[in-house]
Amino acid sequence: MVVCRFLLRCECNPGESVRLVGSTPNLGGWDPLRGVELTSSDNKVWIASAKIPSKTVCSYKYVVMEQDTTTSKSQRGPRVLRWETLEGGRGLTVSSTAMRIDDGNFNEMPSDDHIRIVEDPESEFSAGAMDLATDGFHADSRPTV
């Protein structure tokens, strides 16, 4: 399994959260209630880590939802407020080393995958260890073009 760390910029209102939903079981199998929940300290920059098998080719989208405030199993869970409308979604081919994926802004496709996806073989990281002050990425981690 490869740790993939995702970053997204999306302004949300209080009481809203962002989830990553995609074509693999690790990304919820397109079910927003099973997707990967991102965290944010400012409701603007969202981060999450997911373990995905190496060499997996997948597609995914982000979805804004009500924050999960369910108190019992009989309650349905948070409601979807809006999906990204990118045709075909975002694509990712998972390498064999840890990866950082900066997906830019909600509902906008980044123009260059060489800047968007960076292999990070030296890091063993978790969502809790990310530094939100630098968007969860080191300032020098993006290649220059």
Image (cartoon, rainbow, N blue to C red):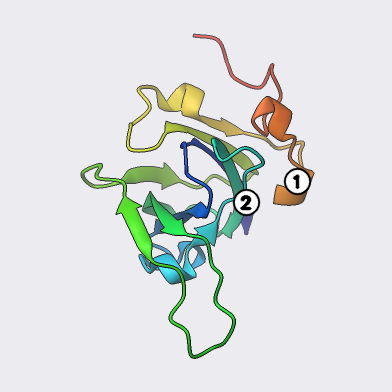
- Residue 137 point in image, percent of width and height: 67, 29
Image quadrant of residue 50? bottom right
Closer-to-camera residue (79/122)? 79
Does dot 2 land on a helix, a strand or a loop? Answer: strand
The mark nearer the N terminus, 2 or 1, is 2
Is disc 1 surrounded by few (<14), some (14 to 19) or many (20+) residues within 10 Å? some
Tell me how many marks there are: 2
Residue displayed at 57% across by 87% down: 72
Give the answer, above or below, for where 99 lies relative to 113: below
Q: Can residue 126 be seen in this view?
A: no
Quadrant of the rendering where the N terminus is positioned: bottom right
66 to the left or right of 70: left
- Residue 77 point in image, percent of width and height: 46, 75
Q: Residue tagged by mark 2?
A: 49
Residue displayed at 73% across by 40% down: 130
Give the answer, above or below, for where 61 lies relative to 73: above
Name the kind of residue labelled 2 in the image: Ser
Image quadrant of residue 143? top right
Q: Is residue 101 visible?
A: yes
